[in-house]
Every structure is written in structure tokens, then in C-alpha cells.
Amino acid sequence: MVNEVCDDLRDTTTDNEPKYFATLFAPSHVGKSTAVKNYQEKVAVPEAIARGLVPADLPLDEQIRLQKLVVHVTLEGGATPRSLCADILAALGDPRSARGSKNLMLRRVYDLLSTLGVELLVIDEIQHLAVSKHRTSEDADLRSIERSRTSEVTDTLKAMLIRGVVPMLFVGIDEARPYLLDDIQLALRCHEEIDFGELCWEDPEERRVFQDFVGRLGIHLAKEGLFSERADFLHADIPAALHEASLGRLGIACRIVAKACMHAAKAKAETVTREHLSKAVDTFAIPRGIVKTNPFKREGDARLVTA
């Protein structure tokens, strides 16, 4: 779904015409940022290589950084129009990203987006438009300042869309939705709201996405030199048990795997095994209340048969 919407936004790119945006709002640790990186890796990088924009013999992370077809920007906390420009400029590779007045920085943003041929701008952690709203301040003047700051940033984003600079994908937690869509002018420019909750095991396509993700995790552990042997996270009941332990959230699955890596490294193992994953559920997922029982220890459950 994410890839299809990103393709649609890029296909609507026409010079000097107002652009549209899509939203990806979901709880923390469901893999929103991972989905964006996956699109860069699977779609943007191959296109950039085919167009001769990025060398084919570089490491993948370097190719993702160098390609500018799809640019991923992560907002800093307490965003302002100036910090928004600085974050975008940094993602575009501007060595003076934090220098200049707001207006000069915004002009550089426009120029670089055009010069580099950016086709999609992803703004992540969009809740940082008004991070201070999460505080329970009783100060009416402070709340007014916070609302004004949020409005200034959304007005900057709105102006970029209306001026036809580049289509955008806004990514954040569910609570960030009103910051954008309560503005009627912005809401009218929304191409689609992506439904991106937990991945459902019973849905064949969503199950495939989860299995593909954890399978590549096992490959990367060896590829990055963390272990001498590749971890087979697609063996037998591992994908289904890991899905249940993570509630179908890719971010939590990563945290469980990271904890399993620690157990494997402590045991001086050559790779991460099912036993390490099970121990990670006991020491990470259960103590944090993510799940109450360990699916790796429950045998004979029909659900734990990889489809």
C-alpha cells in the first residue's frame, strides 16, 4: 500500500502545478519509517541506478543516501519554520543547512528540490510540529504560542504544496493527524490516508510483508558482520511466533531481534537462533507488557505453522 501511494504521488509530478500529499499515521513501532526505507531501497535506488544518478557498486545504505528521487526528512522536536527548512536542507546534503534567515533557507530548499530532481519528500515524525502539545501546560499564553508555531509550520508546508514544489508524504503517530487535516486548505490537498496498523497474520499479503521483513533481518545480521552465520528467521514457526510476540509491529519485532542478538553475543553464538528469540521475548516483550505469554514456548498451536 505504501509503495503504491508513493508511486501515485510521484506520477502526479508536473512543473509549477499544486502538489498533493499522503499521510501515514500509525502507533509507534509498527514500522512506518521502515516502510519508507523499504520504498527507497526497492524502488528509488534501482530507478536512480537505471538513470545513472547513483553508482551501482556502492553499499546499499550509501545508495539510499545519495539518491535524491525520494528524500526522507526526520523533524527535530519543537519544529519551527526555520528548523523545518534546516532539516530538509540537511537531508538534501546542504553543508550550510542551519545557516541563514528563514526566508533565505526556504529559497534554498526550493532551489535544491528542483535542482536535484526530488520527486517525493517524506516528512517523518510530523508530531514534532507541536511536540510541546504533549505537555499538560495550564498556561494559556504558552498554549497560544504553541498553536501559533504549529500553524506557521503547516502554513510553510502548505505553501510548498500550493507552489508546486514537490509532493509529500507525512509520517507520524496517530495523534499528529489533526495538526495537518484540521486545516481545511491542507486537507483538500490530501491524496490518500494510508491505513498502516499492525500487520495481520491471517491476511496473506500482510503475512508476506512480515515474513519478508524478518527474513531480511536475519540476512542483515551476518551482512553487517554481527555474526558469522546468517540467521534463518523463516524456519518453521519462527515468523508466526515472532509476529505474535511483536503484535505484528515491525518496530517491536526489531527490538526483540536486537535483544536476541545480545543474548546470542553473550553466549558467543555464531548466529541468532530460535532459543535466543525465545529468551528475548522473556526478557524484553513480557516484562514490558507487550505480550503475556511466550509463543515460542507453546508447541502444537496451529497458528504457529508458517503458511
Image: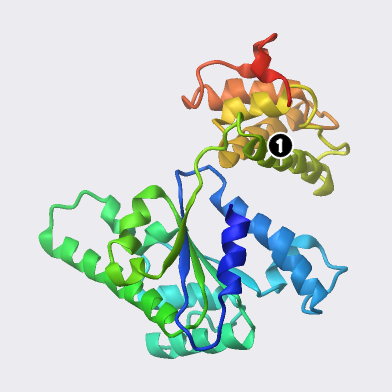
Residue at left 47%, top 63%? 22
Residue at left 49%, top 41%? 197
For residue 152, side relative to residue 191 (left or right): left
Depth check, front residue: 129 or 30: 30
For residue 282, side relative to residue 147 (left or right): right
Residue 148, image x and y in percent?
Answer: 23, 70
Image vertical order of residue 16 relative to residue 292, above or below: below
Q: Based on the displayed image, in which of its 4 quarters is residue 278 positioned?
A: top right
Residue at left 70%, top 67%? 44
Residue 170, image x and y in percent?
Answer: 46, 62
Mark 1 residue element: helix
Depth check, front residue: 2 or 146: 2
Q: Based on the displayed image, in which of its 4 quarters is residue 277 positioned?
A: top right
How is the protein colored in the picture?
A: rainbow
Q: Quadrant of the C terminus?
A: top right
Residue bearing the label numbered 1: 211
For residue 93, side relative to residue 290 (left or right): right
Residue count near mark 1 (Cα–Cα under 10 Å), binned few <14, some 14–19, many ≥20: many
Image vertical order of residue 17 relative to residue 137, above or below: below
Residue 280, image x and y in percent?
Answer: 64, 26
Depth check, front residue: 175 or 18: 18
